[in-house]
Image (cartoon, helix red, strand yellow):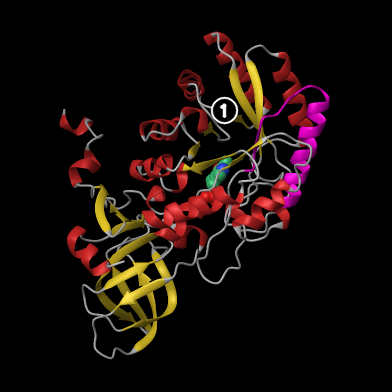
Amino acid sequence: MDFHKLAKKYDTPLYVYDFNHFTKQFNKLKKAFKARKSIISYAVKANSNLSVIKHFASLGSGADCVSIGEVKRALLAGVDKYKIIFSGVGKRDDEIKEALERDILMINVESEAELARVHDIAKEMGKTARISIRVNPNIDPKTHPYISTGLHENKFGVDIETAKKMYIFAKKSEFLNPVGIHFHIGSQLTELEPIKEASAIVADLVRSLKAISVDIKFFDVGGGLGIKYKDEKLIEPYDYAQAILSTLSGLDVTIVCEPGRFLVGNGGYFITKVLYEKVNGDKRFVIVDGAMNDLIRPSLYNAYHKIEVLSTVENPEISKANIVGPICESGDFFAKNIDVPQTNPGDLVVIYSAGAYGFTMSSNYNTRPRAAEVAVENGEDRIIRRRETFEDLIACEIDYLV
Ligand SMILES: *Cc1c(COP(=O)(O)O)cnc(C)c1O
């Protein structure tokens, strides 16, 4: 990846995505599940650029969406509607209605109250809603608490007994068709055992549902496969698939898998450049033109990202420094107390593993235009989102004109 060339051509701060890496990751996972029918539904929230979704659609991917906006993105990018799932703990009536109109594969329901809403809306529309129910298997995924979702203390899904009740209700209703079951215990998973346990619990539920003639067709195992940020020991896709498949004996289900981070995380780079350095007391700061509004993971989760400083200083001295952005918050940092060579203004700082939850979590805080995004594929680069302008930022504010 020629960061100098890309920074020169597109300016900084800049997101760069290696589409060949995306392809490789997708194919690895698809292959791991080849013993069964499977749908890989890319979790759009990880990186929702239309060109990224389109790329996965071209590989045969579905889409896991958590808002009607993401559903619309998936459709616009050419994802097969029968591979689109709409998840999320809180869906508005108009979102449910539109999902039914668009006839996607299934709406993933996360509470009894929501099931009742979907039922009423489907009835009003004279439609039958294909649904899955998100089960909370009460498994500790052993990941960061902010990205853990499979414990009863988290807001997601329903417990096994409630799920059973909901399936019976759905089975009786002519406006609901319970085709799927779903669980997603957390993100950045690096241990296999919690996934296997969760899968076994949910598979048992599928068996007991079968006994009462509720026939589940789609076994949706969520996403969550971890990636390498530092020195994590990772789950191999093959082992992951085997762990899940081993819990499914006797069940004729299509596996649905919803990876986000795994597909795009390591294929993304955030490129920013040094504005200048300063020293406060004995603390050295390297100030760059990217900030927490561009990539919030370090500020939000204290997440580690590998950082490479492409110093142009000859034989630079190396010392500890914080790499910080220009935003008026002490939380605006990419790294603290890491070894950084002396820099010249304009030197590039490359932040690795920025393909997932990077641009999608970015904002306009401090009235900063969001970064441009560039795709690199087979050695060619192309812009997939232009840099925002000041005019873009104020376009929705109209009252001051009158
Ligand atoms: C966020 C999310 C995913 C994707 O998680 P990753 O850790 O990026 O793989 C999948 N399914 C659901 C329901 C999610 O909320």
Q: Residue furthest front?
A: 35
Q: Which quadrant of the figure contains the N terminus?
A: bottom left
Q: Quadrant of the C terminus?
A: top left
- Please give left or right for residue 261 compared with residue 384 in the image: right
**Residue neighbourhood size for the residue with mark 1, other residues' Cα within 10 Å, grouped as few (<14), some (14–19), many (≥20):** many
Tell me if residue 334 comes above or below residue 165 in the rendering: below
The x, y position of residue 378, in whole percent, is 31, 57
Q: Which residue is drawn at the image coordinates 28% and 91% (left, top)?
A: 315
Instruction: Report whether 287 appears left or right of 331.
Output: left
The part of the chain drawn in magenta is 195-221
Q: Main secondary structure of the magenta part?
A: helix
Where is residue 331 shown, x and y percent of the image? 42, 63
Above or below: residue 369 compared with residue 276: above
Q: Which residue carries the number 1 mark?
A: 107
**Residue 356 shows up from this direction:** no
How far from the left and from the top, in percent, is residue 187? 58, 52
Q: Position of residue 369 (x, y in %)?
A: 25, 50
Residues 301 and 79: in front is 79
Q: Residue at (48%, 38%) from the top-left corner? A: 63
Of 292 and 208, which appears nearest the observer?
Answer: 208
Residue displayed at 69% across by 52% down: 242
